[in-house]
Image: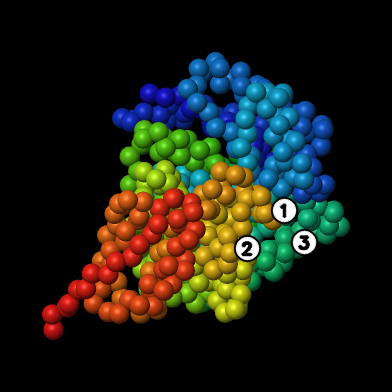
Amino acid sequence: MKTFAAIDVGSYEVAMKIFEISTGKGIKQIDHIRHRIELGTDTYHTGKVSPARMDELCDVLSKFDKIMKSYKVDAYKAYGTSAIRETDNTTVVIEQIKLRTGIRVEVLSNSEQRFMHYKAVASKGTIFEEMMKKSCAIVDIGGGSIQISLFDKDTLVTTQNIRLGVLRVKDMLSSLQARTINYVQLLGELIDNQLESFRSLYLGNSRISNVIVVDDYISRAISAVKIKDNIVSYDEFKKLIGRYRSKSTEQTAADMGLDEESAVLLPQSIVLLAKIADMMRASTLWVPGVSLSDGIAYEYAENNKLLSVSHDFEDDIVAAAEVLCKRYGGNIERNHLVEKVALSIYDDTRKIHKMGKRERLLLRIAALLADCGKYISLEAAAECGYEIIMATEMIGLSHTEREIIANIVRYNKVAFIYYKDRSANTLLDKDAYLIVAKLTAIFRVADGICRSYRIKLEGIKTSIKDGEFIITIDSDEDFTLEKGFFYRKSDLFEEVFALKPVIRIRKVFNAL
């Protein structure tokens, strides 16, 4: 049994959940403490957290620290989301929190944050699995933005972030609210304008049967009327929101057990979700009532092998990369071959490179996106590929991981730039740059072996002998072209791993 605390420093609230986690009983929430504080109002208006709110935040986190000690927690994780992530002085804010409270807050990228929400939803088991059997969308409504992830029979099709969070929308329209009696209509027009681009690019005329909602206020509204499993038809949802629209802020706050400041954000959540459900022509909505804290606890249990995980979340990240490859006209068959060869080399050199499962995943994704830059320019495909990957959010990956992948794709084609000569705008530290060097070295060799767009490779084996890394290829075709490119691209591998790559061809004759 482990006692774990999950702290969410959000845009409009700081919350902490205390969990008991065991291999036998799973994850059990035993306490939930929340404090209303609109950090996002400062960030979205001025780009900084004000001294007054900083004092309030540190005071709350200091109290959280005392509560954790009273529970004698074995471990904790504290994460900041968009209100911290989008400040101009993020590093200063994090350092001040650590010095004044002793709590170390890590900042999640948007894709990492949404992936944790996704894990929290998946932890619900049977209902999640049933929802995923049909076309499904996870709509994650936050303070700064919403994330819409589309699935087709449990396969992630696309995930997109739209800057229409409840707090951001409220702040955008705050100056107009007092001057109009049609605030809801004005809010709807703003949302429609943003959603139209998403609909035309990613949805078209498709219908999404099930919508899973990750939200703080709508979940409380549905829980307040005690609907079984928080599953409603869209018609039932429209009746429910009609009920809340007719009530004053004071009545809504009383019904839901909210303070009036929090109840003010319910209309934004309702209109956002109603517009999205209309656009998708949804039939069923499920509001599981999970939060980032639940996802943090799930990840802790998963990483510490306290939980049996049935869903393969890594497959979701790979599926998203495959969709991206197809969108930019990539040669998916060849890219899968490069992936196969690269992973074979990676696995056979584990004792040398000493990288783990996560780096292996980054190599897979780089292989799938290797030629995406050709969509923009055949001549400058490497640099264009880098820009596409850096501009495309991939759920579950941090910004640093995305930059590692983008650099592997770039340096596969252009000269490797060493750490001392790196660009001033990179976020990669020395450890991350070493990962780029190792993975690029492996990837170049794999790409050289698969140089032809014809699939020639029947099998591959590797061995290490006398300072050579010997790659034996089974093939029934001429491998002269691949040999030439292989030796042109193997210098970085020899430099990074102190092994000279050598390719040998073993002829395989297929019976007619």
Q: Earlier in the sequence, mark 3 or mark 2?
A: 3
Q: Position of residue 180 (x, y in %)?
A: 83, 59
Q: Which residue is mark 3?
A: 182
Tell me the number on the disc at residue 424. 1
The quarter of the picture where residue 383 lies is bottom right
Category of crowding for the residue at label 2, using alpha-carbon neighbours closer than 10 angstroms: few (below 14), some (14–19), many (at least 20):
few
Q: Secondary structure at mark 3?
A: loop
The amino acid at mark 3 is: Asn
The amino acid at mark 1 is: Ala
Q: Which residue is mark 2?
A: 391
Nearer mark to the viewer, of 1 and 2: 1
Q: CA distance from mark 1 to mark 2?
A: 18 Å
Q: Position of residue 485 (x, y in %)?
A: 43, 72
Category of crowding for the residue at label 1, using alpha-carbon neighbours closer than 10 angstroms: few (below 14), some (14–19), many (at least 20):
few
Nearer mark to the viewer, of 3 and 1: 1
Q: Nearer the viewer, residue 141 or 8?
A: 8
Q: Secondary structure at mark 1?
A: loop
Most extreme residue toward the left is: 511
Placement of 495 over or under 7, stated as above or below: below
Q: Earlier in the sequence, mark 3 or mark 1?
A: 3
Category of crowding for the residue at label 3, using alpha-carbon neighbours closer than 10 angstroms: few (below 14), some (14–19), many (at least 20):
few
Q: Nearer the viewer, residue 483 or 443?
A: 483
The amino acid at mark 2 is: Ala
Q: Residue at x 64, y 60 (%)?
A: 162
